[in-house]
Amino acid sequence: MDTDLLIVGGGPAGCAAAVMAASVGMRSVLIESGDALCGALRRIPVVRNVLTATNGPDLAAAIGADLARCDLCRVELGHRATLIDAFDDRVEVTIEPVKTMKSVETVEPVETEEDAGSARTAGSRLTAPYVVIATGVGPLGPEGAGWLGGVAGRALPQLWEADPAVIDDRTVLVLGADRPLGTVARAHPELRARLVVAHPPEDAYKTEEIRRDPRVELVAVRRLELRPGTASAPITAEVETVEGERRALTADLALLNLGSVPAPPAGAVVADRSGYCPPGSQHPGVFTAGDLRSVRFQRIATAMGSGGEAALGAYYASLGLPTETGGPPTEVGGPPGRTGGG
């Protein structure tokens, strides 16, 4: 075995899993495809639901510093896990380099007897008794939104990548009501933009945090069709609302805000019909954590908690103890039952 625990994904969930594993004496190898830990977190300008943090870059830096002090965790930056194989006695993760990485002061390279001193090549395999999959989600492309038409061949930027100066004092057609909309609104209260947010009814639960913002107009639609146009012309769209009304929406520009889709590696990670990977459906050696688990619990704080929980699950499994959470209530002060308590 290369280590006690393999961790795939270097976001808040994966980093929390590494720190938790170290706290109970487990060695881990963390595999991250980017050139830094918590890459997505570094793009979030305002954080209001995590203790001690007010913005993503500072939180990412703090997480990186914590992991740098974690002697039992070694990090493989710039490597993507392409395949997870699970057997009765072990899991194997196939990794491939994404690009040539520069040395990073705060991260030690992973070395084994087989490849010590050399860069990992395509198809390298790491082996451990357990793996935590914390690869999170990726952006949903317009072709994956069944309610959206007229987008073929249109270069529509993502809302969270837009320059605030480009949005300011303009009417913006936002396609989808995913949570980056709330982040942008909180981060830039000075923006005078008018945000016309067209979204399918299943996105309604995401709109509560921006519903009272006077800059936002919410339009729940069954179908939206972008009319052909040029980059210099106003954006026009024909919509059918959920009430059956037909409307024309006009804006200065359109931005994508469609949400995300799970991004697990191929192989032994079990997904449900929605594409998400609930922990209770996995092989005994596979633990899922973070945004990959559920569409409704995509939060930094819940990702961290689930990462720690996944690492503890692997630790308890290594001791032959039950790994499921919860269980029937036990008598207060009494001995712990088979599922915990006491």
Image (cartoon, rainbow, N blue to C red):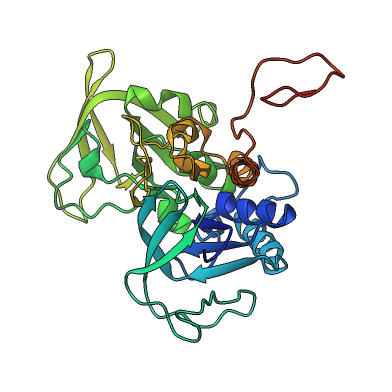
Residue placed most toward the observer, 296 or 1: 1
> Percent x, y for residue 268?
36, 46
Quarter in which the C terminus is drawn: top right
Residue 294 drawn above or below residue 24: above
Residue placed most toward the observer, 306 or 6: 6
Residue placed most toward the observer, 44 or 340: 340
> Percent x, y for residue 315?
64, 46
Left or right of residue 162, residue 108 in this image:
right
Any part of residue 96 in sight: yes
> Percent x, y for residue 231?
21, 56
Residue 205 drawn above or below residue 121: above
Q: Quadrant of residue 228?
A: top left
> Percent x, y for residue 90?
46, 53
Which residue in the rendered view is the most extreme toward the bottom? 117
Which residue in the rendered view is the most extreme toward the right? 333
Q: Count of labels shown?
A: 0
Image point (64%, 20%), residue name: 327
Q: Quadrant of residue 171?
A: top left
Residue 122 drawn above or below residue 32: below
Image point (55%, 30%), residue name: 209
Any part of residue 162 in sight: no
Image point (56%, 68%), residue name: 75
